[in-house]
Amino acid sequence: MSAVAEVRSFNRFYTRVIGVLADGLLRTPYSLTEARVIFELAQRDEAEVAVLRRDLGLDAGYLSRMLGRFESDGLVARATAAHDGRRQVVRLTAAGRAVFDTLDARSAADVAALLAPIDAAGQRRLVDAMAGITRVLGPARTPGLRLREPGAGDLGWVVARHGARYAEEYGWDATFEALVARVVADFAEHRDPARERGWIADLDGDPVGCVFCVRGEEPGTAKLRLLLVEPAARGHGVGTTLVDSCVAFARQAGYRRLTLWTNDVLVAARPLYQRAGFTLDRSEPYHGFGHDLVGEYWSLDLGRSV
């Protein structure tokens, strides 16, 4: 099926799910567009009609007729703008705000009912997918990417998201989450701040990725561990930024060599390692996390010694 057909099919499906094809939205006398205007007016004390028309992409005559009906029903009041007599402003009346309260409460209740049968992992996938759609179709902008050290609750997030993400994408069992928990616990309990560090990647204020640099078993060797980028954040340079930060820290800390262990099924991460200068040293099959896998050992010569 082509991309156009897929999008059209999804549109038909989703309009049925949220009930916008019914005669009245949310069991009220108002259409989707009328409810959207009421929702928008509820976010402002008053709005210029021209600005409201522009923000919602509505025809001037259509919006004017709609506001006329709302005014007749006592839902809005229109007036001349104080700063410019050529402009008109509109605001919700008390009756209009009561209509908004009904629409808002019913919308929240309907969404809660829609989510109720879905488990936490499924809800997370749904929200991630919606965030991805918003990022792709929304206005072009530079996402606010920030790296920071793990704070309260972040180490638990690292364990939980690794467990959930690898179960969802690769079907790995709980033994993988247990491994991540041991790595995180060792980092928290025995970390040498001068030689080891963790990073949490925030995108627009939400945690979307992580990576850790920890001491290796051999002198002068560090390990890159627990690289993770949430699906909704992929394509924004999060993985590259995390890997580059880990490499820069390892070099600054005086390590001679940086290593990592991964699996051949994790194909999305391979270009990140290659661009950073890592080379694949060896591969070996093993059984782990409920599957037959191929482990890969990569390394990067940092050109220094401790």
Image (spheres, rainbow, N blue to C red):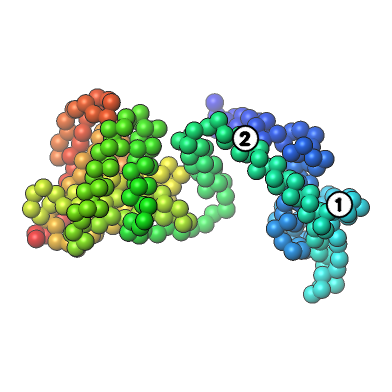
In the displayed structure image, the side of residue 25 where residue 67 appears, left or right: right
User: Residue 197: image x %, image y %?
Assistant: 25, 57
Q: Position of residue 74 (x, y in %)?
A: 88, 54
Residue extending farthest to the bottom is 83
Looking at the picture, how far across and down is residue 239, in whole percent?
34, 49
Splitting the image into 4 quarters, where does residue 11 fall? Answer: top right
Q: Amino acid at mark 2?
A: Ala
Task: Give the residue displayed 54% in from the left and 26% down from the top.
Answer: 1
Q: In this rendering, would 132 be left or right of 181?
A: right
Image mark for residue 70: 1
> Residue 21 at what x, y percent from top left?
74, 33
Of circles 1 and 2, the one toward us is: 2
The mark nearer the N terminus, 1 or 2, is: 1
Residue receiving disc 2: 113
Q: Residue at x 81, y 64 (%)?
A: 89
Crowding at label 1, few (<14), some or many (≥20) Cα neighbours within 10 Å? Answer: some
Q: In which quadrant of the rendered view does residue 160 lie?
A: top left
Q: Can residue 277 be spotted in the picture? A: no
Amino acid type of the residue that numbered disc 1 sits on in the rendered structure: Phe
The correct choice, above or below, for 131 with respect to 60 in the image is above
Quadrant of the image occupied by residue 266: top left
Which quadrant is home to the C terminus?
A: bottom left
Q: Is residue 292 above or below residue 71?
A: above
Is residue 237 found left or right of 97 in the rendered image?
A: left
User: Which residue is more in the foreground, 51 or 47?
Assistant: 47
